[in-house]
Structure formats: C-alpha cells, structure tokens
Image (cartoon, rainbow, N blue to C red):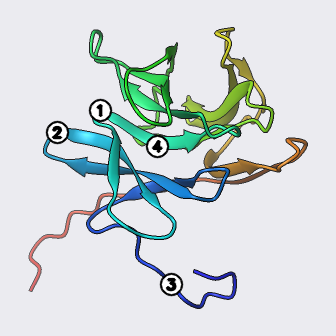
C-alpha cells in the first residue's frame, strides 16, 4: 500500500507470515505452512504468482543488504535441530549453517541483517529473559549485544546505519482458569 494507507494490494493467497522486502524493493519473501511444513516463498511487489524459494523446513526469512542471501531458521535434515541458515536468494542448498539455541521460546524470533551484511541479529530467550545476539556470517562465535535482566523482546529492528536499535519488550502473562457448572 502507499505510505498514506491507500491502494492496498494483496500479494499472496493463503497463509503467509514473517514478510521481508528485498533491498531493491522488487520482492517480498515470506513463510508459508503447508503439508510439507514451513517453506519460504517470494512474490514480486508488482504482484503475480508467488514462487517457492526454499522448499524445506525453513521459516522467518531475512534478505541480506546486497540481496544475494536469505537468512532463516532451518530444521537441519541430519540432526532435526533448528539452526540459522544462509541460502542463495534464488534458493537451493544452504550455504552455511549456524547453531541456534532457543530453550525458552517455542516461537521463532525475528532475525535481521546488520547493514554491512557481516552479521545477523536475533533474539534468544533464556531463563525467561530475552536478549539480542549477533552471529557473524564468517562463522565466528555468536556474541550477546544486549544485556537485559528481565522481560521478553517481542520485536526489534536496526536503523539503516546500524547505530540504533528499536525494540518492544515486556512481560507475557498466561493463566488457565477452570470453570465448573457453567450454565
């Protein structure tokens, strides 16, 4: 849609989530869920038929600043563990796999590229506390970027120059209530 909210255009039919635009503004990559599990598709911002890109158990895509790679979460076919993967934008085999530990949150968090394309930022929740971590794409060890002691991170993004971080944080309350003799 236009910035003022006019002229909305539907790009996909069916369920699609975790959309991310390519840096050239020509494509939207997104996650779908079907009989084979999660997969990643792309569709032109001009409309048209969506095209499968990663037809494996992959989800929450993020396109690199140069538009050549898609980072996503991926179920490793050998170990069945969830990893961070780098795929070519056109699809194919994963080029790199990185370890990813998310013990406290069953939902895959957002992942964002740093503007220089040298690392990925992602949320890791441990002991009920979320922090943002950086995974260098050259294969180095992940490092912790934030050092929060409480709360969950629900969403985040980086400024285009990579100098500022915006995020939403808070608590999540869930209660189960048993109601007897409801009339």
Q: Mark 3 vs mark 1: which is more N-terminal?
A: 3
Mark 2 and mark 4 residues within 8 Å of each other at the beta carbon: no
Q: Residue at x 50, y 21 (%)?
A: 101
Q: CA distance from mark 4 to mark 1?
A: 11 Å
Disc 4, SS: strand
Disc 1, SS: loop
Quarter placement of the C terminus: bottom left
Q: CA distance from mark 4 to mark 3?
A: 23 Å
Q: Mark 2 vs mark 1: which is more N-terminal?
A: 2
Q: Please state the horizontal and vertical placement of residue 82, each as a whole percent of the image.
A: 39, 23
Crowdedness near tag 3: few (<14), some (14–19) or many (≥20) residues, C-alpha within 10 Å: few
Looking at the picture, does residue 5 appear above or below residue 46?
below
Drawn side of residue 117 relative to residue 108, left or right = right
Query: Looking at the image, can residue 112 be seen?
Result: yes
Residue 36's label in the rendered image is 2
Disc 2, SS: loop
Mark 3 and mark 1 residues within 8 Å of each other at the beta carbon: no
Looking at the picture, does residue 179 appear above or below residue 102?
below
Residue behind mark 4 = 60
Front residue of this view, candidates 67 and 165: 67
Drawn side of residue 32 relative to residue 18, left or right = left
Q: Mark 2 vs mark 4: which is more N-terminal?
A: 2
Mark 2 and mark 1 residues within 8 Å of each other at the beta carbon: yes
Residue 57's label in the rendered image is 1
């Amino acid at each position: 849609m236009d910035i003022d909210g006019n002229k909305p255009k539907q790009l996909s039919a069916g369920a699609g989530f975790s959309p991310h635009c390519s840096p050239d503004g020509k494509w939207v990559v997104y996650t779908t869920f079907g009989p084979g599990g999660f997969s990643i598709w792309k569709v032109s911002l001009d409309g048209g038929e969506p095209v499968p890109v990663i037809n494996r158990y992959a989800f929450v895509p993020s396109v690199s600043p140069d538009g050549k790679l898609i980072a996503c979460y991926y179920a490793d076919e050998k170990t069945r563990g969830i990893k961070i993967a780098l795929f070519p934008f056109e699809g194919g085999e994963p080029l790199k796999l990185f370890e990813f530990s998310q013990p406290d949150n069953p939902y895959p968090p957002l992942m964002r590229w740093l503007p220089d394309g040298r690392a990925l930022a992602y949320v890791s929740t441990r002991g009920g506390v979320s922090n943002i971590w950086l995974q260098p794409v050259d294969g180095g060890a992940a490092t912790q970027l934030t050092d929060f002691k409480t709360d969950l991170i629900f969403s985040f993004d980086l400024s285009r120059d990579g100098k500022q971080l915006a995020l939403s944080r808070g608590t999540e309350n869930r209660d189960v209530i048993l109601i007897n003799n409801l009339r």
